[in-house]
Each structure stands twice: as C-alpha cells, then as structure tokens.
Amino acid sequence: MARRPLTGVLLVGGASARFGSPKDLAQYDGDTLRARAWRLLGDACEERIAVGRDGLDDPGTGPVAAIAAGLRVASHDVAIIVPVDMPLLTVAALHALADACRDAAVAQLGPLPCAVARSTLSAFETGERRLRTVLAGLDTATVELDERVLVNVNTSAELDTLAP
C-alpha cells in the first residue's frame, strides 16, 4: 500500500523566553534546530510549511493557531506537525503518526509531534488555546514511539545534555 502524501508543518516558535535566545537558531550536531527540523520534514513529507518567526505570519497565540495557519495552506489531506525543539525526531516516527491518523494522531507523551487531518481545520479555529483540549475533541489515535525521539528542549542546558 502506497503511503499518502503529507504536508509537514514546522512550528518555529516565538520568543523562546525560557531558552534565552531564539530556539530555532540554537545549534545541535552542527546545524540549527530549525534547519534540522526543516530537513526532517523534507525527508518525510511532500510539502513543507514553516509557521512562526520568518515563516507564515506568526499567529501569536500558540500551537493551536499555528496549526490552523498551516492547515489553511496545506495541499495534502494529512499534516505532520513538528515543533522546532525536538531534534531527535525521525522520519519513521513521523510516518507512524501519519499512518495512524484518523482525525489526528499523537505520541504517548503528546500532544506534539502530531498528525492532523486537514478536514479538522475548524476544530483549530474555535479560539481554544490548549492543544490537548482540541485533540481530545477529535478522533485521535495514540502511537507508542521510542521516548528518546520525543525529547524536547526548553533550555540551552537541556540541549547541551543531548548526545549527537
């Protein structure tokens, strides 16, 4: 069975207050977090969209509004949503989420990364700001992924502890 085409949505992020500098420009294993995530989405998806700083207009209201912005312009029925601060994600993990997607699919530690059907756009446009709440109202599958690939970094010290 052929894999369905995917749109990758990179959540570039906002002010990075806890990180102390723009998180997307932080270096990991010889590359910025942004370039690393962008390359991952290119390997996993047929289309890529960046939402946030220097991407689509930053909706300024967190991941729910950013996902809505990505879904509005997505060309494919399923979008893979990846935050910039998860440098260990893999193509296999993203494809597992896409394969399990009904309305949405999340990893066991969710809510990000996730796969979201473009048809659910209206659920992301209600004004609700909590992603977990939006996903709870959808037919959302949970996918067991290797917890190592789900590590996210909120501070430069956390990034420094990851072994490339």
Image (cartoon, helix red, strand yellow):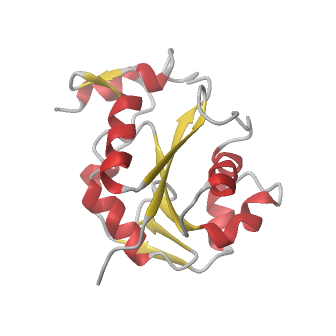
Residue 20 lies, with reference to residue 59, above or below; the image says above
109 and 82: which is toward the camera: 82
> In the picture provided, is 42 more to the left or to the right than 102?
left
Furthest residue toward bottom: 1
- In the rendered image, which quarter is residue 13 located in? top right
Furthest residue toward top: 21
> In the picture provided, is 136 more to the left or to the right than 93?
right
Residue depicted at x 65% and y 36%: 56
Task: Return the x and y of residue 66 as percentages of the image width and height.
Answer: 66, 45
Residue 18 lies, with reference to residue 1, above or below; the image says above
- In the rendered image, which quarter is residue 151 located in? top left
Task: Return the x and y of residue 49 as percentages of the image width and height.
Answer: 53, 44
Furthest residue toward right: 127
> In the picture provided, is 76 more to the left or to the right than 65?
left
Residue 76 lies, with reference to residue 82, above or below; the image says below
78 and 96: which is toward the camera: 78
Residue depicted at x 25% and y 61%: 92
Question: Quadrant where the N terminus lies?
Answer: bottom left
Residue 60 lies, with reference to residue 114, above or below; the image says above
